[in-house]
Amino acid sequence: MGQSGDLQMKLENGNAGFVLEDVPHLTDYIPDLPTYPNPLQFNPAYSVVKQYFVNVDDTVSQQIVVHKDSPRGRHFRRAGPRQKVYFESEEVHACIVTCGGLCPGLNTVIREIVCGLYHMYGVTKVLGIDGGYRGFYSKNTIDLNPKVVNDIHKRGGTILGTSRGGHDKSKIVDSIQDRGINQVYIIGGDGTQKGAAVIYEEIRHRGLKVAVAGIPKTIDNDIPVIDKSFGFDTAVEEAQRAINAAHVEAESIENGIGVVKLMGRHSGFIAMYATLASRDVDCCLIPESPFYLEGEGGLYQFIEKRLKENGHMVIVIAEGAGQDFLSKSLQSMNQQDASGNKLLQDVGLWISQKIKDHFARLHKIAINLKYIDPTYMIRAIPSNASDNVYCTLLAQSAVHGAMAGYSGFTVGPVNSRHAYIPFYRITEKQNKVVITDRMWARLLSSTNQPSFISPKQVTEFKKVKQPPAQLLDGENCEEDKSKSEDVTTKT
């Protein structure tokens, strides 16, 4: 199921360069829908809240640090309960589906959507779609209520099952229509959200009163716009166990080297943050920062230097790093999985063997290398406390948005405030580590590893005119990001 060509930007311009990137609403194509008082005003849980509802004009700024003369920039509609809703509680028939790979926190999101619908809005008809998108038309559904989902947040994985692919929009919307479903909650990564956008467009084309809400999920933290994806904190925390094991192995033997491969197909956030958190890592290799093995300033030279200094070292490598080397040496084919993701070679095994071969050939240093791959251990565990709280906020924000009649949106925190974001902003590109940003500089300072950027590339980058005011700590403007990406592609 490809990206729909019907998606249109819903922009509202204001003073001083203010731009609201709004999300679709059911009234955009079904005029004169009746509204109802939000039942939250009668909910005891909210009786102590000073202000029940989000102001109709509340927005969240995409960029929080700007130059004093900068325009106000892009904003998104703030998430939260509205004074009026477009569904009566007894008419709501909701469904939840999980797609793509596993991620810590999936069950927590499912639980909190169900409990939010039941306890906040009095909704009692909630279905779980079994087995991802194709479950709409090829599998049974699961009746969900607070009792069924009570303890599921303590388990890893998803009680609904998942799969890749299965994006048959006509069959999916036929099933939604036949079952009388009018709220669809879709939990998944960028491929899943692209599918959700197409489902929304088909629903809109048919003129159905069905709200489609997305909850973005990726362990790699590669979804743009939002601060971070759920499960990421848990993944970084769990990665520490593997790094610690590699460090213990390496320091317990002469010239010990521990190599840890972490998840990160195209974005090295897990590897970067796990390295910064650990303090035991000597070198971190990520897809955004190409590296080289041989010669002056190469990885082999750095390993030899660190072994002479400390007698051991730990290397963390993201699964997407060094794939160009593997493609040449293994003559790999451009194969893809059911979601369209390129199938990657095992860079951890490859680089471990290359390091062994190099030092065996030199006969200068006898090394002892241990390789650890905790990939599926990291993503299959339950979410930690931080992610559990985050998942609760995501789920409740999605429920508030659907009840308020918004559709075709993804929910997520932007500068620590939850907002409703159009699907096209989530799927237009992947979030990546910017290697000219301060966070990557902090990592290089922490590990004291080489940047692997050649002097020629540094000179070329310095020739590029810098913007008059750079944003701070990962909030680089689009122009600055594109320049850094140009440097990466030249390596």
Image (cartoon, helix red, strand yellow):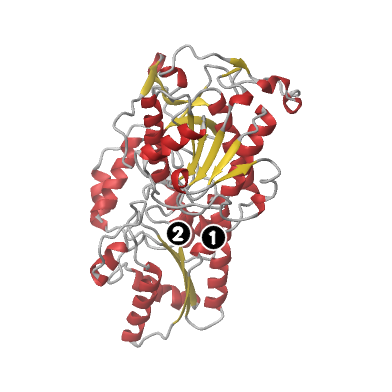
Residue nearer the viewer, 241 or 125 = 125
Residue drawn at the location 29% of the way across and 32% of the way down: 5
Badge 1 density bin: few <14, some 14–19, many ≥20, Cα 10 Å: many
Report x, y in % for residue 11: 38, 21
91 sits left or right of 6 in the view: right
Q: Earlier in the sequence, mark 2 or mark 1?
A: 2
Is residue 216 visible from the viewing direction of this image? Answer: no
Residue nearer the viewer, 311 or 250 = 250
Badge 2 density bin: few <14, some 14–19, many ≥20, Cα 10 Å: many
Query: Cβ–Cβ below 8 Å for labels 2 and 1?
Result: yes
- In which quarter of the view is residue 335 placed? bottom left
- Quarter holding the C terminus is bottom left
Q: Amino acid at mark 2?
A: Met
Task: Work out which residue is located at the far top of the displayed protein and give it.
Answer: 32
Residue 378 tag number: 1
Task: Work out which residue is located at the far front of the displayed protein and give it.
Answer: 178
Label 2 residue SS: loop
Residue 263 tag number: 2
Residue 345 tag number: none
Q: Amino acid at mark 1?
A: Ile
Decide: is 242 above or below 488: below
Is residue 404 visible from the viewing direction of this image? Answer: yes
Residue nearer the viewer, 256 or 96 = 96
- Quarter holding the N terminus is top left
Residue drawn at the location 42% of the way across and 52% of the way down: 440
Report x, y in % for residue 310: 50, 75
Label 1 residue SS: helix
Task: Work out which residue is located at the far bottom of the displayed protein and give it.
Answer: 363
